[in-house]
Image (cartoon, rainbow, N blue to C red):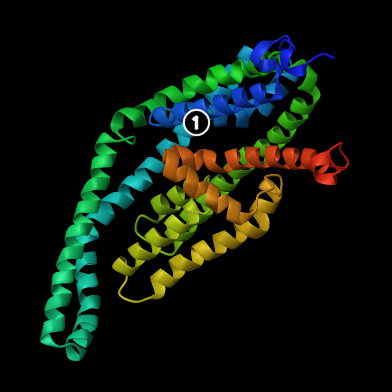
Amino acid sequence: MDNPAERPPPSGGFLATPDGRLRVWLGAALAFLILVWLLRGILLPFVAGMAIAYFLDPVAERLQRMGLSRTWATVVITLSFFLLFVIVLVLLAPIVGDQITAFVQRVPTYIHQLGQRAQPIWRALVGHLSPHDIDRLRNAAGDYAGNIAGWVGGVLGELVGGSLALANLLSLIFITPIVTFYLLRDWHRVTDLVEKWLPRRHEAEIRQLFHEVDMILAGFVRGQALVCLTLACIYGAGLTLVGLDLGLLVGLGAGMLSIVPYLGSITGFVVAVGLAVAQSSDWMLPAEAAVVFVVGNQIEANLLAPRLVGSRVGLHPVWIIFALLAGGALFGFLGLLLAVPSAAVIGVLARFLLARYLASPMYSGDGPEAGN
């Protein structure tokens, strides 16, 4: 009888065995994550260009059906998209500039108002604390002030010398349109090339997974982009109407940051209410600023997200929060941008593997090992 241990390995070498293929895929995934981590400081314009190209691909296909070539469709879309962006930027620049100028001029007034608000609190503390406790409180306040100053200095250092430096910001502005153009023009060429690399035996299954991933990413990228634009208008207009200094800038920033779930609304709420407390002598303006974000959040949760994003991402809120924290900790702002799409792709793969497990003898116990 033939000894299995003496049989020659099947043709194909290392990749012919299931364990070998699994090791190759795991090694490739690990190498990809390491590469992304090493290059995270320069990948932002490429990720932004890929997202914009993915967002505009349906428009390019529609122009192709109207008779334009893919290249001319890409030229028309790219120029129109960035021309619209420049027009909006030019229109908003004077308003934002006036708000920044007014804000800088009123900073001394804000500091004086905050000091006046803190005086009753300080007098109440002095009346209930001993001189020793007051000295300890002053020392602690000095220590915290030093820590805050050090933190602010560190943040400014990151802005000047880190991933948000001027050179990288310029690369985001000038490289993103170039990346968007070439990816949008060659989108189908790239996807066709990837399809040729698929293993023939599992081609149908992989195509189905790609289709599910495409549906999820389309629902998130295109839907969330429209949500961000709508929220930017709501927050910017609302904060400007209630009279908040820098209201338009804070509102637009909060709307744009909403591309990352929860980040825009939380950051905008904290900044807006903080500015309102410094600006106003009563609590009416902070309450109005808070109402703007509460109303915007309700509109997003009950109207915008269900209609524009829907349930196509298919992720539990807790999983989204975990993905955001993990992505931010590993890759910074780039990780925040990629967290939800990556989590959605992982969810598709996890559901596929779970379905295969539930249909396997390992789950049902119907295999040859069941009787052992």
Rendering coords of residue 110 (x, y %):
24, 65
| Left or right, 211 with reference to 83 | right
Toward the bottom, the furthest residue is: 127
Q: Residue at x 45, y 53 (%)?
A: 251
Toward the front, the furthest residue is: 1
Q: Nearer the viewer, residue 266 or 61?
A: 266
Q: Indicate the quadrant where residue 59 lies.
A: top right
| Left or right, 90 with reference to 303 | left
Q: Nearer the viewer, residue 185 or 158?
A: 158
Rendering coords of residue 193 (x, y %):
66, 13
Q: Indicate the quadrant where residue 4 lies.
A: top right
Rendering coords of residue 237 (x, y %):
48, 55
Q: Residue at x 61, y 55 (%)?
A: 317
Q: Is residue 258 visible?
A: no
Q: Indicate the quadrant where residue 76 lies.
A: top right
Quadrant (top left/top right/bottom left/bottom right) for the N terminus: top right
| Left or right, 334 with reference to 125 | right
The image shows residue 30, relative to residue 73, as above or below, that is below
Number of marks present in the image shown? 1
Quadrant (top left/top right/bottom left/bottom right) for the C terminus: top right
The image shows residue 49, relative to residue 228, as above or below, that is above
Type of residue at label 1? Leu
Rendering coords of residue 333 (x, y %):
43, 41
| Left or right, 363 with reference to 115 | right
Q: Residue at x 74, y 12 (%)?
A: 10
Q: Residue at x 17, y 59 (%)?
A: 146
SS category of the residue bearing label 1: helix
The image shows residue 154, relative to residue 198, as above or below, that is below
Q: Residue beneath label 1, please?
A: 33
